[in-house]
Image: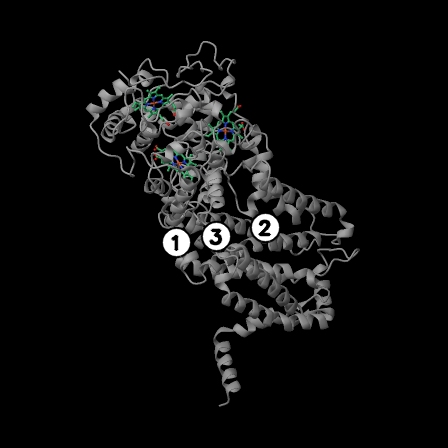
Amino acid sequence: MNALRLLRAASLPSLCGALLSSAGACDRLPGRPESAQVAQEGSPEWTAHVFNTSCRGCHAQGSEGAAVPLMDNAYWRAATDEQVTQAVLHGQGVLMPAFGPTVGGPFTPSQASALTRGMRALWGGGAVRSPEMSGTVVAGNATNGKAIFDVACAACHGANGSSGSVTDPMYLRLVSDQGLWTAVVAGRRALGSPAWNEPMPGRPNGLTTTEVADVVAYLSSERPRSMSEMQP
Amino acid sequence: MKAPRMFGVAIDWVESRTGAVAFIAPLLTHHVPRNAKWWYVFGSATLMFFTIQIVTGVCLATLYAPSAAEAWESLRYIDQQVPFGWMLRALHGWSSNAMVVMMAIHMLQVFLHASYKFPRELNWVTGVFLLFTVLALAFTGQVMRWDQDAYWGLGIGASIADRVPLIGNQVRGLLLGGPIIGGETLSRFFALHVFVLPGAAIGLVGLHLALIMKNGISEMPKPGATVEPATYRAEYEQRMEKDGVPFYPDAAQRDMVFCGACLVLLVVLAAVYGPFGPGGQPDPTLIDTNPRPDYPFLWIFGAVSLLPPASETAVMLVAPLVGVLVLVAVPFLANAGERAPSRRPGMVLVAALAVMAVAALTWEGKTSPWSPVMDGWSALPTPSHFLTGRTPLEVQGANVFQFAQCRNCHSLNGLGGERGPALDAIATRMTADQLMRQIQQGDGNMPAFGRNLDSAQMTALVSFLTTLRPEFEAPAVIPGAQLPLPVRQMPGEVATPVAAGTQ
């Protein structure tokens, strides 16, 4: 019974103690949900970790990964930082998930731009070539675009092309205009898709900004605006 | 007038009008068995956690916005902005789990000591109903987080409701407030979680306590001291008269010490581990492939994952009913005779088996089949040889494959989840039609993606999957059937950039 009495005597003060100390130390308690990441934000290790767990599944390198390979220099020679941060925070098109806080994603805006800078530090190198991207697609002329497409692209992407259609409505439903712009400008060498910000045989300057805008406008005009438009 | 005297007058005044003292005094002074030592504290601790749930729950209800659009945001607001808000959520969450655990221990103790025998059969039955009410509170509470776990839990609940023969659709509609999980669903579960179920629980707790007062607290079982319904009551009363101790302070102080310790533990857990969730926002287009039901339900998921798919419907619908019936029947099957565990080895074995089964299934639910590779979709790139030589549509199909988190359950090139079969050579086993059906309708433990993928995503995905086969193996065909999508011959090499656009 003595032990019991002792316990009883001790329980109330210790309870109060626990409550008080938790109140005092509230900001430092381990259970408090964190809004910030722990690792040194923006460091190469941090960037690699975040990228490997959150992005690499879709954006790898060479012919690996289904979306534009962010580990390749070609992309960074074509894109600006603000565009990348924008895509990370708000997503892009149908298949790029948003990672920003407005959708409950894991990244704060400052983390998103730290990630962008970190990625450029790892894989960037070299200035951004024209026609660069700025986060908004330049409006183009679809009729001119069709003409350029017939000359520059149809050999690979036309009816008898070997590389598959890029005017297929199903395909176009899944890719944003920005995504088309990137596909044309940065290309994807490892899969046989040329980069049009580089000299091409017969086109020492590749495609100009206006020409790319026109081609994208043409492809965009082929995209059905609703599902019902797609039914044959 | 001196203060104590004024107090006495006030008490008398209230007493003469309400009879409150006459009602409360026996609650405190009634005699309980002297030997009922520490074994009997678990019920009180359960009650304490229940009280905490009500207090923290009322506080949370003042801060929480029960609308689909705001619920998730309001939890983040409580966590980040409201002083001690996160602590409130943590206490509510941890106390909920603690209550379930404490209740299970209490139930186990009652079962082992056969305290449910005459005249306490209904104590047990109300307890069983309380168990299910509290589990329902835990489930609806998880839904309140309105994150992806909640979404998934609801999806599974809805698909169980769907299995009910004949009225499945109606049951589902009643549960969700419509054919799909939407704004109505949250309001419905909110009403259940804060009005209906707590009301039921409070009523049942009252009944449970009234029965305890009526029938008295059972004595420690002694081998040979059997329960004879004809004489038990008289003997019990005699013994209490002679040998009992008043509940307060003798037994109550043990309860207080134990509850105090539980409370300290609760505060520590809440402070160290923080609140549960909310996880990612629920987004109907993203099927979260890592369904993590809260702890009290993990064992059910473990059991389901072990079932052969064909038996699922029968088991999912029948097992809960059988469970309730068996539990309710316990005191009626044996309400007299020996109570000591040493004289009831069979029952001890049953209890031990039940504990081990729940523990093993919880482990199962926590680990193997319900543990897809969480970040497979965003961490494991589609291998090169499944992308080279593909059309842009097929490449987008690979994007859909990652985006829809198929990779979390299905491996490619040996990397990815192993919950479902590897899909490296799926095109040799399934035609485009079969693939489409599999993805739309799901099968066994594969979730139905249905309307979560629109027709463009589905077309791209299926056209990607139909390229997944070794170079020299023929694609699957149904004899005589027409393939809706032409299957291309895969070129072995990368298309080389020829001088295009020069003309």
Residue at the disc numbered 3: B197
Residue B74, label in figure: 1
Q: Amino acid at mark 3?
A: Leu
Which chain does tag 3 point to?
B
Pointers 3 and 2 within a single chain: yes
Residue at the disc numbered 2: B128
- Work out how far the residue at label 3 is from the one at label 2, CA to CA, in angstroms: 15 Å
Q: Residue furthest top?
A: B480
Which chain does tag 2 point to?
B
Q: Secondary structure at mark 1?
A: helix
Which chain does tag 1 point to?
B
Say which quarter of the image contains residue A182: top left
Q: Residue B247 in the image: state x and y as whole percent.
A: 65, 69
Q: Residue A77 in the image: state x and y as whole percent.
A: 35, 34
- Work out how far the residue at label 1 is from the one at label 3, CA to CA, in angstroms: 23 Å
Compared to residue B365, the image places residue A5 above or below, namely below
Mark 1 surroundings within 10 Å by alpha-carbon count, few (fewer than 14), some (14 through 19), many (20 or more): some
Q: Nearer the viewer, mark 1 or mark 2?
A: 1
Residue at x 72%, y 47% (from the top left corner): B347
- Depth order, front residue of B25/B311: B311
Say which quarter of the image contains residue B306: top right
